[in-house]
Image (spheres, helix red, strand yellow):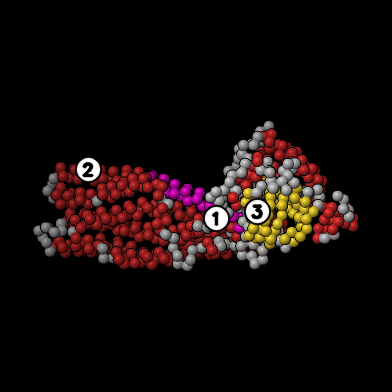
Amino acid sequence: MAFGGGGHGGGMGPRPGAGRMPDDLRLAPGQRPDVRRMLALFRPYRATLVGVLLLIVLAAAIGVVSPFLIREIVDVALPRQRADVLAWSVGGLIAVTVVASALGVTQAMLSTRVGQAVMHDLRVSVFSHLQRMGLGFFTRTRTGEIQSRIFSDIGSMQAVVTSVMTQIVSSGAGVLMALVAMVALDWRLTLFSLIALPFAVWMNRRVGRRRREIVRTRQEKAADLSAGIQESLSVSGILLGVTMGRTEALTRTFSTDSRELADLEVRSTMAGRWQMAVFTTLMALFPALTYLLGGHLLFSDPEGKGVTIGTLVAFIALQSSLFPQVNGLLRVANQVNRSLALFTRVFEYLDAPILIQDAPEAVALDPATVHGRLRFEEVAFTYPGAEEPALAGVDLVVPAGQHTALVGATGSGKTTTGYLMARLYEPTAGRITLDGHDLREITLESLAASIGVVTQETYLLHASVADNLRFARPDASDDELEAACRIAQIHDHVMGLPEGYGTVVGERGYRFSGGEKQRLALARTILRDPPVLLLDEATSALDVATERAMSGALAAAARGRTTVSIAHRLSTIRHADQILVMENGRIIERGTYAELVARGGSFAELARQDAWREDEVPGGGTTA
């Protein structure tokens, strides 16, 4: 019985937050990313780039040979009827064209490869960096915003990264070679040809500043639109919109945002177009004006010792090559200005501090040797931006191999305690230890292998059941998958599906009920066989009969394993070895189920309010 392939390559998506990129990750007003940092992206490929630059310079040098061959044809071969000069000059023109084309193709291939490699490195760097960001980052940042920066921003940078470096060198070398050749032909015509250059540079800088601001605003609006699509067109978003009767309103909002984005696209495209049109017109007029000036110089020197007809024709040919190269440099400068806004947004993510990471001397624990004793020592924690602490001076011990339960009203600090146990957040004060090791001194990889977490909000990949399970252990056998699913009371249901373990669960697992998804998530964690099992409302979506059946299976699986349950339904923790009652971020009661009910305190009140307890023990008496 084959359940499917190996591990799935997907990743778990964070829950969308309500805000944009936090202000502390933005560059200060007017601050620009260092251009040297952009160039540093190409450092690993400098050997290939040197080859590309040599090809570009060689192509530029070969390109300026043509005007001199043309001068020979006009001044020597044709007037003097020199067939030999005509033959080798024409042959030279053909050879120059063929060689320049071959060099151009080779250069384009190498530069494109380098550019795509840089894009790949940048995408992977951003993705890898975000994978190591703390949970708090994703609660403050919308998923659509993240997707926009990885795909839209980096994608928009692609043309710049893959062509801008070679374009700068190519145009720069072309301009330099053309200027040298033009000076060699006639220095007076060269000076005349450069009259408009300072005006073009000034205008280009001014337009570039405008475009940079427009592009940044456009990308932010595109991120808003992407986030809106991700939130409203997900399964959850569709259900919310339909059940709340908000589909028309959502369409209107999307239409407004889309129209604003379209307007920004128009502004971005048209920024500086009139100025550049003026410059382009001037450049188009210069050949005619050069003929006028060259004609006067030729008329004033009938002997042809200064400017000849061939010189004038060759100069116009060089001028026709120079102006596009200058225009290319100006366009590249505009592209760089526009890309600075994109680089700014990407560097914001790369520069975002990783708050939770391995210490320099972190210890890698062997899960097989972990006993599972957890201890909180005067632990306090405050969420970023919150005024009140979520936990305050928490002291607790979770004995190895025992079942500890955390209960309390909503907002009492139960889930936060679980987050700190799994090191999804760092304590603001105090420390947490596992078998005497401070969690901050344990490698994150070995900690994840030692503490298995099953949350109330389950996440399933859009993949087969087998692939979802093997996300925890890519090398797990079919028998191991089946064993984990039997413990989680889901094997029989999976085998009843049309394709069994090969059945695709659907987007976020919406082909399964809430209880079925929780049992799959539980089986996925059991498959890893962690010495510590953290269950955060992991059975909240199960019906009473299934919950009782799975509780027995979990009890068998938990033998010799430390189990921490965070629960509202007290039926799941009746037989816990100790129960910790939390209120306002503090532990206010400790004991077994029977002991706490007998005391008549906060836990007894929770028990009286519990629906299961009302069914089983009228009046609040204990059944322990």
Residue at 75% from the left image edge and 46% from the top image edge: 402
Estimate the x, y position of residue 397 in percent, counting from the top left.
Answer: 71, 52
Q: Circle 2 — which element?
A: helix
Q: Which residue is mark 1?
A: 354
If the image is split into quadrants, where does the N terminus sit? top right
User: Mark 3 or mark 1: which comes first in sequence?
Assistant: 1
Under mark 1, the amino acid is Ile
Q: For this view, does 301 lie left or right of residue 29? A: left
Q: Is residue 465 visible?
A: no
CA distance for labels 2 and 3: 81 Å
Q: Is residue 128 magenta?
A: yes
In depth, the one of 391 and 37 nearer the eye is 391
Residue at 84% from the left image edge and 56% from the top image edge: 597
Q: Circle 1 — which element?
A: loop
Estimate the x, y position of residue 382 in percent, counting from the top left.
Answer: 64, 62
User: What secondary structure do most residues of the magenta stretch adopt?
Assistant: helix
Estimate the x, y position of residue 221 in percent, counting from the top left.
Answer: 53, 62
Under mark 3, the amino acid is Ile
Q: Is residue 336 magenta?
A: no
Q: Quadrant of residue 228?
A: bottom right
Residue at 26% from the left image edge and 48% from the top image edge: 62
Q: Which residue is mark 2?
A: 91
Q: Are marks 2 and 3 in contact (CB under 8 Å)?
A: no
CA distance for labels 3 and 1: 20 Å
Of marks 1 and 2, the one in the foreground: 1
Residue at 79% from the left image edge and 54% from the top image edge: 591
Under mark 2, the amino acid is Gly
User: Mark 1 or mark 2: which comes first in sequence?
Assistant: 2
Q: Quadrant of residue 387?
A: bottom right
User: Mark 2 or mark 3: which comes first in sequence?
Assistant: 2
Q: Where does the magenta region start and end?
A: 108-136
Q: Which residue is mark 3?
A: 432
